[in-house]
Image (cartoon, rainbow, N blue to C red):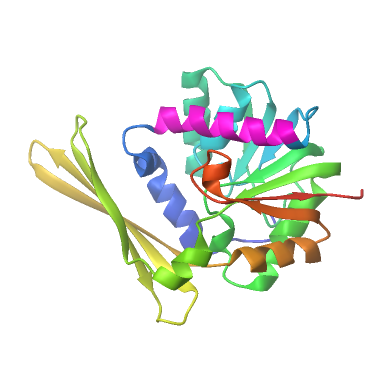
């Protein structure tokens, strides 16, 4: 294990959610793998046409890592959740993707060998870090795994909007199955002025004996685009820029930055 231990609740959240994580995308996770892989491929090729080696340092069950591997990149995927990594290996084999996977905390990537043309952390992983010091630690760790001139790609929720709207839930949806399932996501903000909130996923599953309920929860800190860009510059990145999700065909806003020096 690494010297930095992540908050137990984060590990428990993703370990518990690993079997159901695809439900975040309804019944279209395979489509999301292909779509996000295509969007990230285009983004990377525009910025670094010769990039081949990618580290996905918060890969979860492999959504982006597998998508990029299927487009010809050499991908290393790491995540703090061992069960997510176990599932990612299964999904990569099922989809015919060659990805190397391992367990690592993205605040301490010292156990990950080599340097990469691109480091990515997508799907709102950074906001699990609940203070500025932890964000800075993660960004420095990511920069340490980039080659000189390498590209950092991070995606988060649109917190500039969320901190104004403070949505209490996302629209629920039904997965036809079988088994038939209902997926519900709630956002419990600590108070009207706080950036801290708890996400709750409720998964209802129909069985012969009736309906079962699984509840997964995790803590987040909403971080604005300006704050994360500033943290990136403080960590030594240059050319820090945000792109709207619709501009790059991605489901979240995307921040890119350059490791200008070795």
Q: Is residue 111 left or right of residue 58?
A: right
Toward the viewer: 233 or 202? Answer: 233
* Above or below, 104 relative to 93: below
Q: Is residue 56 left or right of residue 10?
A: right
The residue at the point 86 percent across, 43 percent down is: 149
Residue 207 painted magenta:
no
The residue at the point 51 percent across, 35 percent down is: 63
Q: Which image quadrant for residue 69?
A: top right
Q: Which residues are magenta?
A: 29-46
Residue 93 rendering spot, x and y as whole percentages? 51, 21
Residue 205 rendering spot, x and y as whole percentages? 19, 42
Toward the viewer: 38 or 138? Answer: 38
The residue at the point 56 percent across, 51 percent down is: 253
Q: Which image quadrant for residue 50?
A: top right
Q: Is residue 165 left or right of residue 43?
A: left
Residue 34 painted magenta:
yes
């Amino acid at each position: 294990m690494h010297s930095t231990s992540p908050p137990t609740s984060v590990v428990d959240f993703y370990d518990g959610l690993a079997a159901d994580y695809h439900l975040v995308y309804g019944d279209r996770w395979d489509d999301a793998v292909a779509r996000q892989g295509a969007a990230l491929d285009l983004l990377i090729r525009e910025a670094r046409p010769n990039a081949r080696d990618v580290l996905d340092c918060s890969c979860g069950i492999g959504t982006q890592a597998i998508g990029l591997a299927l487009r010809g990149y050499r991908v290393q995927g790491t995540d703090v959740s061992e069960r997510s990594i176990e599932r990612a290996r299964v999904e990569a084999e099922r989809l015919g993707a060659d990805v190397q996977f391992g367990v690592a905390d993205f605040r301490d990537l010292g156990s990950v060998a080599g340097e990469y043309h691109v480091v990515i952390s997508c799907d709102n992983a950074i906001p699990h870090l609940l203070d500025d010091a932890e964000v800075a630690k993660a960004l420095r760790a990511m920069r340490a795994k980039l080659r000189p001139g390498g590209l950092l790609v991070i995606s988060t929720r649109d917190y500039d909007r969320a901190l104004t709207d403070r949505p209490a839930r996302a629209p629920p949806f039904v997965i036809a199955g079988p088994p038939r399932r209902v997926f519900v996501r709630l956002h419990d903000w600590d108070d009207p002025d706080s950036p801290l909130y708890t996400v709750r996923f409720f998964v209802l599953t129909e069985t012969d004996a009736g309906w079962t309920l699984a509840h997964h929860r995790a803590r987040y800190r909403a971080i604005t685009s300006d704050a994360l860009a500033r943290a990136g510059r403080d960590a030594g990145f240059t050319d820090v820029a945000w792109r709207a999700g619709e501009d790059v065909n991605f489901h979240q806003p995307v921040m890119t930055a350059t490791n200008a020096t070795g």
